[in-house]
Amino acid sequence: MVIKLSTLKLTKKIPNWVCSKPSLSSLSGACRIQIIPETNQPSTPSSDFDTKIQVLKNKLHPETLATVLDSTTDLDSSLKLFKWASLQKKFHHSADTYFQLILKLGMAGKIDEIEGFCNEMVKEKFPNYEQVLVALLDAFVRNSRLSEALCVFSCINLSSLKLSISEFNQLLVALIKENKEFKDVLFVYKEIVKAGIGPNIDTLNYLIEALFAANRVDAALEQYKRLHKKGCNPNGRTFQIIIGELVARGRVDEALVILDDMFSVRCEPDYSGFYAHIIPLFCEMNKLDVVMRLFSMMRESKVLPDTPTYGAMIKCLCENLLVVDAVKLVDEMVYSDVRPDDDVFMRIIDGLCELNMLSEAKEFLNDKEVASVLPYNALLEAFLNDGTFSIAEDLFDEMFERNITDHRSWNIMIRYMCDNEKLKDALKYLARMTVSSVSPDSSTYSALIIGNCKLGECEDALALFHQFRAKAGLIDLVSYAQLIECLCHKEKIQEAAEIFCFMSTKRYALQSSSFDKLMKGLCTSGYAGQAIKLLPLAYYSGTLSSTAAYNSILQGLFSLGRASDLFVVLSRMIVNGCTLDGETYCILIRGMTSLGSVEKSALFLDSMLRRGLSPDSETLAELLEYLVKNAQVHMILSSIDKLVSESEVVDSAMYNMLINALLKEGYKNKASFLLELMLDKGWVPDSSTHALLVGSSVQDEIDAKKPSHDNLITQDTVGYILAEGLGNSDGPDCRP
């Protein structure tokens, strides 16, 4: 029986012909039917319907009805004909008539009606109804009507009809291919068990595959372990499914264990699908030893690798610098009439170039008569990177003569000459390029901009930028950075800022070091406010606003007398995750000092020292002068110890300043401590500091009613040493 299906507007493409099993050939009638989904069915003209009724009236029997139903494209008309015949006296339907109607209902998606008619057919027990059910199941499976197939399958189970394991497998594989829910696969598998039919390895492979698809990995592995208990041995398909799924989930170690199982049971898959799937997986993981063993097995099985498998092997070999072996595989491909693709040639050339086998690479391209420009471009670039410019020129001329050049070929040569300050030579190639009807592109303009920048020709570079911009073109990131830096170096800050604004709106990020130079140039030129306005653009384009950039803004604001705005920039700096460095703290300390905010200056100094940073001498001197002038040195008492013990920035003059100020502010012990440190460094206090210390010691002796331990220590360590240091022979009497 052959069933012809018309073109249907269905979610799944249905073949034009669906052939049933040979065992169903006993069903009456050729049964060529055309089925159209109900939603797209034109109504059958009443005259045509009446004609068919007339035919049936004259000769009504099951075979005639089946033939008429087969020729009726409209589902409603088919139902009417079927029901009309049912009402006729002495007429009895057959399995053939039910087959025609159920098939039409199924292809139209009428699942509920299918179940009713199938149950009715089973109940009436028409001759050959079992074969009809199997034929319906087969037709629906072949046409990807799997919900309808499952409905028929349920009716088969109720009818106690025994299917063969191959028929079960046919349904299982269809469910898996259509990504049906696991519960449907499990339902079919349970029916196999209920029917007392022993699953074969194909059945269990489908079950394992479905478990993986349902992300039930452990259950799938458990089924694999229980294969022997079910009387089955794993085959190549089993290992392909499990290894592939484990690798896809990143469980590589387990995949290797399964692969070892395959080796231990000496399973040698004899079909290309296994190797084509597994070898590229392990090549991608660079498991060279595994790959070589699998490839050897493939050869022994007389399985010819396909292009992707060869490509994966060659890539893996080249990544491990086994380029000679990779070349042998290319020779094998050519001998087997398997044409290597461009990627294979690229891998070989890249590998040979990495090994600095440039002559061998050129010989390889000539020997294989490669006509693709990509590997030639790679070799051309390798010669230039190796510094053999003359050989590169010869290769380019050879490529040009053989018409194996593209935009990139020209740009490689022009870019190299521009990078090496050979702008005149680059312009000669540009002229040849234009004469050859190859228009300059983004890479060309980018190279020429770099060439001009390297020679300090910023005006020409800027003109090229605006010329290409007028063509709605964008240069690359390297030339963008070079142009910004060149303009900043030539103090063309506004032009640099204009380019940054334009490129940032196109979301082109400027490298951090170049952005720092731009910000510094703006702020040094008195444009700190403009620099601040560029920060949102930097964020938009992905340009990193570094600590150096923010420091430039802080310094610029301070230089403009806008110290009160420093905190606004500081808060933004912190929000953006920038680390405060020594320069940042110094600017903040000087800014707060200029505003007379001693508390904040002292706070920044303390925070700076706690982070292991030291102020520069200029900042510290400025702060100390302000504190001394306003008798507020005591505000940094906690910081003084760290300054003198951990920093070398405090010089002799600063020691004198601190000692003098602390004595005046009443902090004699701290002053004495600093004096000891000063003397340890071999520095001599100045005259004013000396006078204050001597006066303080004499007054202490007069005021003291009796000597104390602390007094003795003070006299010994300060007064006596001071006298000795000044060369006074009449040192204080330190006897008890």
Image (cartoon, rainbow, N blue to C red):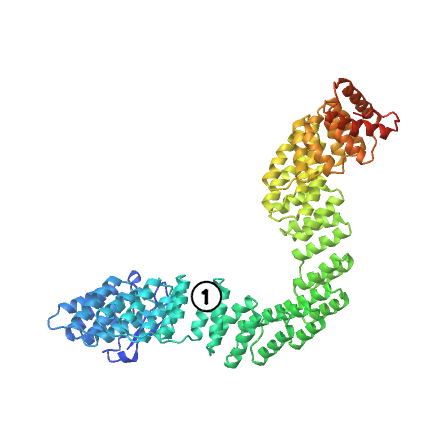
Identify the residue under disc 1: 245
Q: Is residue 272 visible?
A: no
Q: Quadrant of residue 584?
A: top right
The residue positioned farthest toward the left in the image shown: 89
Nearer to me, 560 or 633:
633
Residue 29 found in image quarter: bottom left
Please tell me how crowded label 1 is: few (under 14), some (14-19), or many (20+) other residues with Cα within 10 Å.
some
Question: Is the N terminus in the top left, top right, bottom left or bottom right quadrant?
Answer: bottom left
Residue drawn 68% across and 50% down? 480
Q: In the rendered view, would you say 211 is above or below 370?
A: above
Report the residue that reaches farthest toward the front: 736
Left or right: 723 as drawn, with respect to 166: right
Front position in the image: 209 or 137: 209
Residue 93 in the image: state x and y as whole percent.
Answer: 17, 72
Q: Would residue 673 be seen by someone viewing this image from the given angle? A: yes
Apparent side of residue 465 relative to residue 691 in the rendered image (left or right) = left
Q: Amino acid at mark 1?
A: Glu
User: Where, by quadrant of the figure, is residue 82 drawn?
Assistant: bottom left
* Nearer to us in this view, 310 or 668: 668
Image quarter in which the C terminus is found: top right
